[in-house]
Image (cartoon, grey):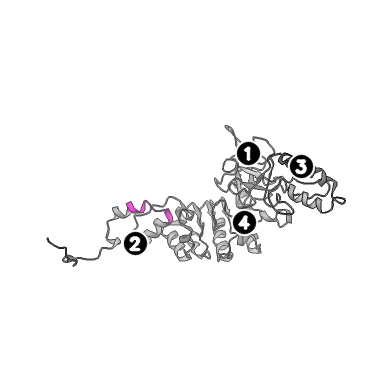
Amino acid sequence: MATRSSKRIKIANTRPCYISGLPDSALVHVARYLAAPSRILFAIAISRGKLHQCNANLDFSEIDKSLASRLTDDHIKSILVYINAKHKLKKLNLNGCINITGVGLEPLRDSVVLEVIDLSLVGQYECPNIRPVPQISEMEVISILNSVVKADGSSLRYLLLPKKFRSNPSSTLNSFFAEYNELLESRDAKCSARDGNNVCNQSIVTTGRVATKWIMTSRIKKYIEYYGTQSFTCSKCTNNICDNCNDPRDGNHSFIEHCQTCERDYCLDCSGMLMCVGCNNYECAQCANMFGCEKCTQQTCKKCNGCDSCGIDVCLDCDSCEDCDMTQCLECRYSSCTVDWRNACRGCLEIVGPYIESKMEELNNLR
């Protein structure tokens, strides 16, 4: 019986095969399975120009965050130069690119086609607070954005800045906001809010209930959280919504609201909003971490709904005492009362009364 040899079969005149040696047609087919940013990096790496056709949108949320976080300004600059971003790119989202300073955005200087730029470095529905603080530089970024805003025929209509900038206001930032506000106010934008088949179509007038400018610059404590955020614009669809359009379902809430968690504005078409009855703050449906009371069906956020003693979820209305203002679960309120019945709050005693009766009934049933 013949035995197999362990020796490798030698093939004459073999040469190593490199990916760059493959025909363009094969590489184009492979590149179709890559997200746009990865496709461009792939094309740059192997020096092939046919692998990506710029579709005017470049969204880094399409690639894994572990890759986005390793990209440098040199990578970003190479990508923008490769796609001729100054003349072709309309929307840019740098989600996850926390390792850049912003100097890599230089190819966008004086662009008149750029419409939307998201520099928050976080994804939709994500908290904008990044730890450790990212390296992105206000000086580098604002210089480039200023050139875009001041360019004759500028198309910029929506801007989302990093929390790092918005938390540290400066004269440079305020001067830029003034220029950007002037640009947006010059356009006579129309409201896109829809009630059935009817579109509002009224001009956006920056004298609403809260927002007084497209970019909020007030440092008054009541509005400080809005500083540097763009009003009258949905963060997801980027449609403009006036401050006079209300929710057609009840008319009590605006058609566009600000989420306190991800710190973005959303219209009702893109995300439902939940309001906390305790602090009157809104959270979008994707960020919402509300407690719904089974008795009154009201919603309260995590900051407002905790038991003052143990912290479990309780209703701000149903589980609060009108006499002492303590919000407690029944077990904690009962424990507080039993420490000293004589000095217990009258309102608390009225609340725990039915609870004590139910416990007594349980004991009787066990006998």
Which one is closest to the eye, mark 3 or mark 2? 3
Where in the figure is residue 137, as x and y percent of width and height?
57, 65
Where in the figure is residue 163, as x and y percent of width and height?
61, 59
Element marked by disc 1? loop
Q: Earlier in the sequence, mark 1 or mark 4?
A: 4
Which one is closest to the eye, mark 1 or mark 4? 1
The amino acid on which the numbered mark 3 sits, given as a three-letter code, is Met
Can you tell which mark lies on residue 193?
A: none
Q: Quadrant of the N terminus?
A: bottom left
For disc 3, the marked residue is: 360
Q: Nearer the viewer, residue 225 or 293?
A: 293
For disc 1, the marked residue is: 202
The amino acid on which the numbered mark 1 sits, given as a three-letter code, is Gln
Q: Earlier in the sequence, mark 4 or mark 3?
A: 4
Q: Earlier in the sequence, mark 3 or mark 1?
A: 1
Q: Nearer the viewer, residue 4 or 264?
A: 4
Which one is closest to the eye, mark 1 or mark 2? 2
Residue ID at (85%, 50%): 341
For disc 4, the marked residue is: 179
Can you tell which mark lies on residue 47?
A: 2
Badge 1 vs badge 2, beta-carbon distance below 8 Å: no
Residue lying farthest to the left in this orientation:
1
Element marked by disc 3? helix
Q: Earlier in the sequence, mark 3 or mark 2?
A: 2
Badge 2 vs badge 4, beta-carbon distance below 8 Å: no
Density class for disc 1 (Cα within 10 Å; few <14, some 14-19, many ≥20) is: some
In this picture, which residue range is highlighted in magenta? 28-37
From mark 3 to mark 2, how far is it between C-alphas? 81 Å
